Amino acid sequence: VQLQASGGGLVQTGGSLRLSCAASGRTFSTYSVGWFRQAPGQEREFVAAIWRSTGRKYYAAAVEGRFTISRDNAKNTVYLQMNNLKPDDTAVYHCAVDVSSLIMSSLRTAAYWPYWGQGTLVTVSS
């Protein structure tokens, strides 16, 4: 599976951005999809995910209510709508995909996701 993330940029506090991640694969609709972020000197952290079988969405507490993950299976694309951005949201954002091996209890752990995009930088100025 190949992933291509886009949509990052520079935005002021309170602004919005929408990230996109286009994926290869003929059975994209059956994949779990997620977003993680990594700030300089920090570990890669979970942001949001959609579980493959139920479509249920999961969010990190830090972004709950401000970010929305969604997918368009016809376009093989997953999105991350980010509203009310804060300087602490500054990071490189990576999309990730799992085909079948991920278990639900591990979805917030980056190491368990097998496929990754190259990342897109989001900078929020104060």
Image (cartoon, helix red, strand yellow):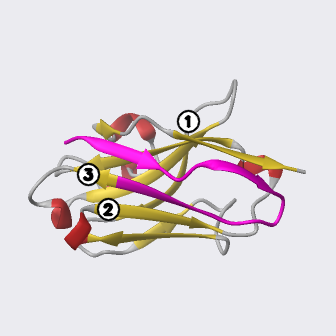
Q: Which mark's residue is nearer the viewer, 3 or 1? A: 3
Q: Nearer the viewer, residue 8 or 87?
A: 8
| For the residues bearing labels 3 and 2, Cβ distance under 8 angstroms | yes
**Which residue does the numbered mark 1 point to in the structure image?**
44
The chief SS type of the magenta part is: strand
Q: Which residue is mark 3?
A: 23
Residue 110, compared with residue 49, is above or below; it is: above
Instruction: Look at 35% across and 70% down and name the residue there.
Output: 71
What amino acid does circle 1 point to? Answer: Arg
Tag 3: amino acid: Ala
First along the sequence among labels 2 and 1: 1
State the residue position of label 2: 77
- Write the residue at 47% across / 49% down: 6
The magenta-colored residue range is 1-21
Q: Which quadrant is the N terminus positioned in?
A: top left
- Inter-mark Cα distance, 3 to 2: 6 Å
Which quadrant of the view contains residue 105?
Answer: bottom left
Disc 2 to disc 1, C-alpha distance: 22 Å
Secondary element type, mark 2: strand
Q: Please check the rendered image and state whether residue 100 is part of the magenta-colored stretch, yes or no.
A: no
**Lower sequence index among marks 3 and 1:** 3
Query: How far across and down, in percent of the image, does residue 46 sit?
Result: 53, 49
